[in-house]
Image (cartoon, coloured by chain):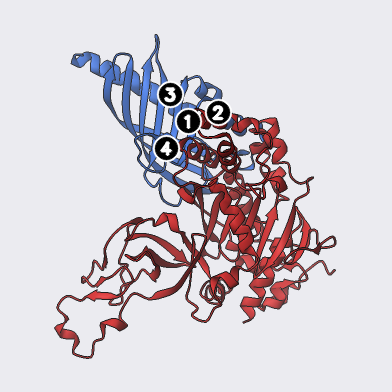
Chain colours: A red, B blue
Amino acid sequence: MNQLIDAKNITLNPDELVSNYKIATPMYTSSELFEKEQEKIFRKTWVWVAHASEIPDKGSFKLSKVGREPVIVVRDRKSNFHVMVNRCRHRAATVCEVHKGKTSSFQCPYHGWGYGLDGSLRAVPYPEQYGDDFDKSQHGLLKLRTESYQGMIFATFNEDIEPLEEFLGAAKKWIDLFMKQGGGFPVKTLGEHQFAVPMNWKVQLENTTDAYHFPVVHKSFLQSLDEEAEETFSFLDGEGFVEDLGNGHSVMVMIPELVDLEADLDRKIPERFEELAQALRDESYPEDQVRRIVRAAGGSGFNLNLFPNVACSMAFFRVLTPAAVDKTEIRHIAIGMDGGPEVANRMRMRLHEHFQGPMGFGSPDDAEVWERIQRGVDGGRELPILVNRGIEKEVPGEAGPRGHVSAETGMRAAYAMWKRMMQE
Amino acid sequence: MNQIDNANLLWQVTQFLWNEAAILDAREYDAWLDLWQAEGLYIIPIQDAEDYADVLNLCYDNDKMRRDRIKRFQQGFSISSAPAAVTVRTVSRIVIDVVDGESVVVSCGQHLVEDKFGRQRLWAANVRYTLQSTDSSFKIQEKVVRLLNSDGVLNSFSYLH
């Protein structure tokens, strides 16, 4: 394997940028490439925009992004989801700047054009000056195709793309498993941490399938756990794996005994969940339900990485937004049990705060190393970025190649999809 | 309380808050832990709430979490805090909201500048303390730091607000 890349002649040809499990530096640094990615990836595939529980009622809406483009995600009166670009069709002002709320319509603040929950243009003040051929039905907010699976709402600018469920394919099974952390209740979002990191978005995409970094970057988190929990999170010596699920998706199983949260309910309750179990018993929950809720409360034992912008990551949704070639915004959305015991949801939020977000014991260290990558690629552009770890020992899995838990199989899956889309 | 008592209390509270600010900028975290009542809560919320226990916060620290957080900063295994950003903060616009027996609720404004990687960032916050008088000073029973952009896109913090 040739160790270096011909730095003088690096082009933006996807074949050269991703070659033989080596990634060339412009993948993280080229603004021109970043613009192409917006067109060829974020405008062409299914992009996660919201979870259904974030817009729970008729008329509920929230702002989101598809790539860099601001969109509004709405639940209409018939509970159908709509995703439309947040830009008035008259002179382009955003029609909504409230992050999240409930409404019956959207009105542009500039000249008062009014739009319905489905984006259709309803009202134009003083319409006489537009003449008879002005067709309101042609001037609704720009709508995206919108589909959902298990409450995860995706949208796309691409009218010709396959249905969402086909795109998710082998990942669906893992989404189903992930949603079992409702503990018998529907999954609902419980708020989010948001932070920006000076890094290319693909660094974040890689990290969700990177178990190799965990004992190094997260040593200080591991040290803050009790012995039993530290053992649970020391998964590099375990039976976990990473599997390519097709279409750029992959799953990284870190804690195999926490793949199916409805199995093994007789298992001993971990020490750090004993207080929760007792609180539930005190609230008269029957023992089988106590065990189900407690087992669900700690989250799933895997990260499901969905290309290009969302992951079902153990106990939360991890969403990335590519803001610029060297700036990525990240949202860590906490989830809990809709209608479930408050004491369990409170524990989930405390666990989320423990690791995630700007003040977590984990995320700041992740953010530091990601920024170090963006600083590092300023030097030595002839040096490849290696994602070949574990390839020698890969075996066929259920859906695609399966490697060691610390293998870079998931990154290879994502980069294969990246290449396919950039070449289309 | 008469006017002189009020002015005296405001001066005592001010000295306490300035001292805490200096301790945090100097990262003298063991001294900071000593300022607390054991049952005290250090909270950096994302949104308003009647009871911050019921919502997701940036941090919701009881005594154990405070101590774990400080240990993480001090042990040297956390890459984001080894070295941490350096900070300079000023605390002002101090207003005593409530005096109830030995308990004083006090609000203030805080500007904090952090520096790391040759880059400075500015964070503004409304801070509300519940302090308990002791013989010589105060102990913190609750500290709630409301960053102006707490529900926006933040950066990671390697220090305390």
- Estimate the spatial distance between the alpha carbons at disc 4 and disc 3, rounded to whole Å: 31 Å
| Quarter of the image where one finds residue A101 | bottom left
| Label 1 chain ID | A
Chain bearing mark 4: B
Taking the image as shown, residue B139 lies to the left or right of residue A231, namely left
* Separation of marks 2 and 3 at Cα, in angstroms: 42 Å
Is the residue B40 above or below the residue A78 in the image? above
Q: Position of residue B70 (x, y in %)?
A: 57, 30
Q: Where's residue B62, x and y in %?
A: 50, 27
Q: Amino acid at mark 4?
A: Asp
A154 vs A84, left or right, is right
Residue at figure coordinates x 69%, y 36% from the top left: A230
Which label lies toward us, 3 or 1? Answer: 1
Amino acid type of the residue that numbered disc 1 sits on in the rendered structure = Glu
* Parent chain of label 3: B
Query: Considering depth in this image, is A271 or A30 the residue closer to the camera?
Result: A271
Tell me the tag on residue B19.
3
Residue position for label 1: A283
Label 4 and label 2 in one chain: no
Q: Secondary structure at mark 3?
A: helix
On-image quarter of the C terminus of chain B: top left
Residue B101 placement (x, y as % from top left): 29, 14
Residue at the far top in the pictured view: B135
Residue beneath disc 2: A278
The image quarter containing residue A139 is bottom left
Given the image, on which type of amino acid does mark 3 rest? Asn
Question: Would you say A169 lies left or right of B109 here?
Answer: right
